[in-house]
Image (cartoon, rainbow, N blue to C red):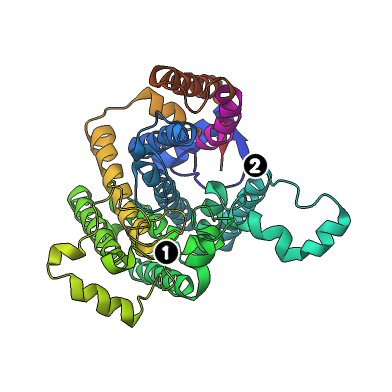
Amino acid sequence: MNGAPDSALPGCQIETAKDNVLSNQRLDTKSKRLQSLDQFRGYTVFGMLIVNYFGGYQACPQVLKHTNDYCSYADTIMPQFLFAVGFSLRLTVGRQLQSGQTWESYLRVVRRLLGLVLVALVVYAVSPRANSWDELTKLGIWGAIQEPLKRQWFQTLMHIAVTSLWLVPVIHRSSTIRSGWLIGSASLHVILSYLFNFTWCNTSPNAIDGGPLGFLTWTIPAMLGTFACDWFVAGSSSAEASTERRASPVAWSLGIAIALMALGYLFSCGTRFYDVQPTEKSESVSKLALDPVLPASSRIEQVTSVKSNWTDWCAEAPFVKPPESSERQWNYWMMSQRAGTLSYLTFAAGFSLAAFVLFYLLCDVAKLQLPLFTTFGTNALAAYVLHDLVSNAVQPFFPKDSPYWYAYMGLLLFCWINWLFLRSLQRQKIFLRV
């Protein structure tokens, strides 16, 4: 997450009014500022507030909840952060290279990203690992860090930092090299998931957002953001910006977005290999498939023998809840944010690009803006840090089983308090950048 298109990378700093004016002047000398990126980011931050606060309430609609076995609306939020980060990273490094800076630029970026790693380690508190020194020594290093690695540490901020670090070596390269890096990263994730990672992420304590190896598929929306930067911003990269920028970025981007969403859905159809057959329903079937990535030959033979129509191979559409695990075992090909699966992040990357195009048309073409999204989008890190504190203050007075009117009143109060804090910072021209 970040506060402005040209300063989206970690390195926690307070930016004052003077700094902000200078930053905008530097930006305007190279190209017109994309208001759509701030609005897109603000929409994403606001969506995060609603999902994170309201997801545990009985009154919350299913589409706003994370369930880890399909792509709900809640699961589209985090990929949009990665998309915006990739966009901004490409823009920042490209402009610095145009100014003649080389290794200094990369060192600055890496230093700021490592700063975000430190912020994540501090923000995501870990419960005591042992009650005594003897217990801690018995746990050992792996026993002490296994749960934080799978859950507490590797949440949004850490994934942004690690994914960005993974992009740095190729962030200034051609689209061909970046495409190869994306495909290689995704392929490596599939291989590691086959070897151990999918089962490990779904074994207690369950991972969050793909765990330590999630960056390999979070690379998909982040790298797509770098391509969008080339298409929509003149002067965004070093040597090839002028040649790679499309004459019609909107039409081109929408075509890519639709293709990626279709490809993600096509990947997800592999989940139909894991339908529980009628002869197995009387037996005790495990939630997780034993062959979650590459179906065993016996499974392939059994499933193909009962699926006679092509529609039998079609997975549920995104945002539609699939059958329970008693009807279909969990596997790598379902859209799962918990495991950071290929189908999920391919679809979500396309969805992120389509959403950004909509904001581009509304904000940069039609010149429409929503002040609410401006407030949240220009101070995204502050919003992220504050929202947990505000939630801890509000939720104790609003039980999870509250009636609809009372639960929604709590949600409104939560969003309003967050807005008050961020609006105050905005008026004072204080921005927490990453």
Q: Amino acid at mark 2?
A: Val
Tell me what residue is drawn at x 59 percent, y 52 percent.
151
Q: Is residue 230 magenta?
A: no
Q: Are marks 2 and 1 in contact (CB under 8 Å)?
A: no
Q: Name the foreground residue: 217 vs 127.
A: 127
Residue at numbered disc 1: 284
Q: Residues within 10 Å of mark 1 (few under 14, many from 20)?
A: few
Query: How far from the left and from the top, in percent, is residue 429?
Result: 54, 25
Which label was assigned to residue 123? 2
307 lies left or right of 352: left
For residue 214, the mark is none
Q: Nearer the viewer, residue 132 or 188?
A: 132
Above or below residue 121? Residue 13 is above
203 vs 352: above or below: below
**Side of 5 relative to 272 (left or right):** right
Q: Which residues are magenta?
A: 380-395
Number of callouts? 2
What residue is shown at x 25% (from left), y 62% (from top)? Answer: 263
Q: In the current view of this chain or complex, which residue is farthest to the bottom?
A: 297
Amino acid type, residue under disc 1 in the picture: Ser
